[in-house]
Image: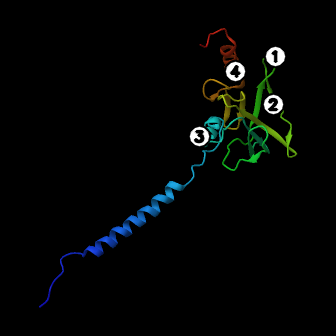
Amino acid sequence: MQTFRKGFTLIELMIVIFLIVLIYALVFSYFSEEETKPEALTPLTLKASLADAGMLSGQTTLLCTDKCKTCYLRQGLQSDFKLYENAANLQNSEVYLLDTYNDLSLAEYGRYDDKKVCLQLDFYPNGSSTKAVLKTPQGIFYLPSYFGKPQEVESLEAAKDLWLKDTKLVTGTGDFY
């Protein structure tokens, strides 16, 4: 007499389920443990990228050298600058600041590790940062210190107008509030 099997035994089913769960756990743990890297720093995403990656704790300074090809980050005033290892699309940037005559002038930051500093931005615990205008090969960008988001502008004159408008809002007698 021959008997035919019409199904799996309980042990066979348990082994198959165990293997599926094991494979799922390995694949899921690989993707969940992958560190979230900040997106590349650009003039429009500079502050948001650093904040989203948790790199803005206390007073933080971003410093770039080599025509803004190499950037460093310092968290706190007493610590050393550490190489920013993530992508930064700030190459060949020029930084303009407003002088005492309300004219934009090219910023001079000095040197770091015997290399000319092309960009230095400070980020403060209250959410403010250094106000600046960045001129890059991709365009001209106004980076406000307190209010609003960075924005691309048509010219240095338009960036200056935004700078002066923001300054008037902050120094006005309750106009902003």
Mark 4 vs 1: CB contact within 8 A: no
Q: Residues within 10 Å of mark 2 (few under 14, many from 20)?
A: some
Residue that lies at the very extreme toward the left in this rendered image: 1
> In what element is the residue under mark 3?
helix
Q: Compute the Cα span from label 4 to label 2.
A: 15 Å
Say what amino acid the circle numbered 1 marks.
Answer: Tyr
Q: Quadrant of the C terminus?
A: top right
Which residue is the site of mark 1? 101
Which residue is the site of mark 3? 52
In the picture shown, does residue 97 fall above or below 74?
A: above
Say what amino acid the circle numbered 4 marks.
Answer: Trp
Which residue is the site of mark 4? 163
Say what amino acid the circle numbered 2 marks.
Answer: Ala
Q: Quadrant of the N terminus?
A: bottom left
Q: Which quarter of the figure has residue 15?
A: bottom left
Q: Give the x, y percent position of residue 39.
A: 60, 44
- The residue nearer to you, when weighing 34 against 159, is 34
Circle on res. 67: none
> In what element is the residue under mark 4?
helix
Q: Compute the Cα span from label 1 to label 2.
A: 15 Å
* Precedes in sequence: disc 4 or disc 3: 3
Which residue is the site of mark 2? 107
Q: Give the x, y percent position of residue 85.
A: 69, 50
